[in-house]
Structure formats: C-alpha cells, structure tokens
Image: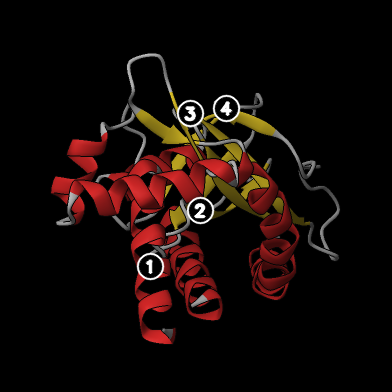
Amino acid sequence: MPAESSQTLERGLRLLRLLADGRRGRTPTELAAELELSRPAVYRLLTTLQSEGFVRRDGDGRVHLGFGVLVLARAVQPLLREGALPTLRRLAEEVGATAHLTVAEGDDGLAVAVVEPSWTNMHVAYREGSRHPLERGAAGLAILALREGRTGYLVSEGQLQEGARGVAAPVPGLPWLEASVGVVTFTPLDPDVVGPRVAAAAAELSCSLT
C-alpha cells in the first residue's frame, strides 16, 4: 500500500507539472498519452485533484491548473525570500547595487526579495512585490532566457526606470521555479565584471534551494 500510494502521488505531481508549462490546458486523453498512463488512471487522478481545487475543467473539457495552487504559491514565497536573502545580501554588498530575486507569475515578473547595499551613497529603492512584464528589464529577460534554455546574464538600461541599469541571470536547475537574480543601480557598472558575479549568485541560490 505505501508503494502504491507513493506512485499515485508521483503521478499526480507529474500531471501538475505538465499543466504548469503555460500551454492552454490539455484533454484527459492528451494527459494520458504524455504521462504514459491509461485514461482510467488519469481520470482517477483528475477526480482527486479537482476535488482539492488543484485542477479545473473548462467548457471544452480541457484540464487546467486550479486556483488551489495559489494557496501553495503564497506559502512558498516567504520560504523563497528567506532562502534568498543571504545570497542577495552578499551580492548587494559586493557589487554596491540593489540585489533582488524575481519570479515569474504568468507574463509578469514579481520581486519576492530585495536587499539594498549598506555602504553606498545612493542606490535604487526597489520594493518587494513590484511587478513588471517579463519582456521589460533584465530580471524578466533573464527568465525568458531560462525558458529558452539559456543561462547567461542579461543587461538592460532604462526599461523600467529612467537611468536605471540592470544585470540579471536566471536561476538554473530548478524545474519547479522560474526565477532570476539581479542587481539594479543608477551608477555605471561594468557588465563584464558584474555579470559573472550575478550569474554566480544565481547558481549559488539554485544550490541552496535544491
């Protein structure tokens, strides 16, 4: 019984990961094919997940993530913030710029953790909870790069705030998280120097969250 229960849980998690890939839902038949399970097995999973609010069916019978996952997402954000703060604090102090962790929420980037440097005369005040389109700013561009399998750092200037310069790198190796680590400043910065440090911080954070 424990082995059977564990297998059911593993299948349910795989199903949720499929639905989280941003496509416009799937039919039970498509889910069965991608999971390499029988349709009755998929229907049993869907019945349980739907009753708990983790999946929903639209008018065409296609399956989507349910709003129940939002409850879990809200619980994860404080944990992400706590786990990211040591890495961001070191990055902010070394670079002398405001460091941040940004996660994807649909087509937007959401800043879930921000650390300002302690020794600079001027730095960018970047509020936790700030949201912006992924196609604007280094943090969002890094997340889009992650979706394409690229892990290098990205640079932007003036896309979110006039005069602000940003460098960000995707957090690699975490299939459950689309995120980037970055810095933003009003002062000049050398991407060739700052970029590798930001990428190293992103890799460090990935290891700490694994």
Q: Label 2 vs label 4: CA separation?
A: 18 Å
Q: Amino acid at mark 1?
A: Thr
Q: Nearer the viewer, mark 1 or mark 2?
A: 1
Which label's residue is closer to the chain start, 2 or 4? 4
Q: Position of residue 39 (x, y in %)?
A: 20, 46
Location of mark 2 (residue):
180
Location of mark 3 (residue):
107
Q: Amino acid at mark 2?
A: Ser
Q: Label 4 vs label 1: CA separation?
A: 49 Å
In this view, the residue in front, 10 or 158, is 10
Q: Amino acid at mark 3?
A: Asp
Which residue shows up at 78% across the image and 48% down it? 123
Location of mark 4 (residue):
158
Do tag 4 and tag 1 residues touch (Cβ < 8 Å)?
Answer: no
Which label's residue is closer to the chain start, 4 or 1? 1
Do tag 1 and tag 2 residues touch (Cβ < 8 Å)?
Answer: no
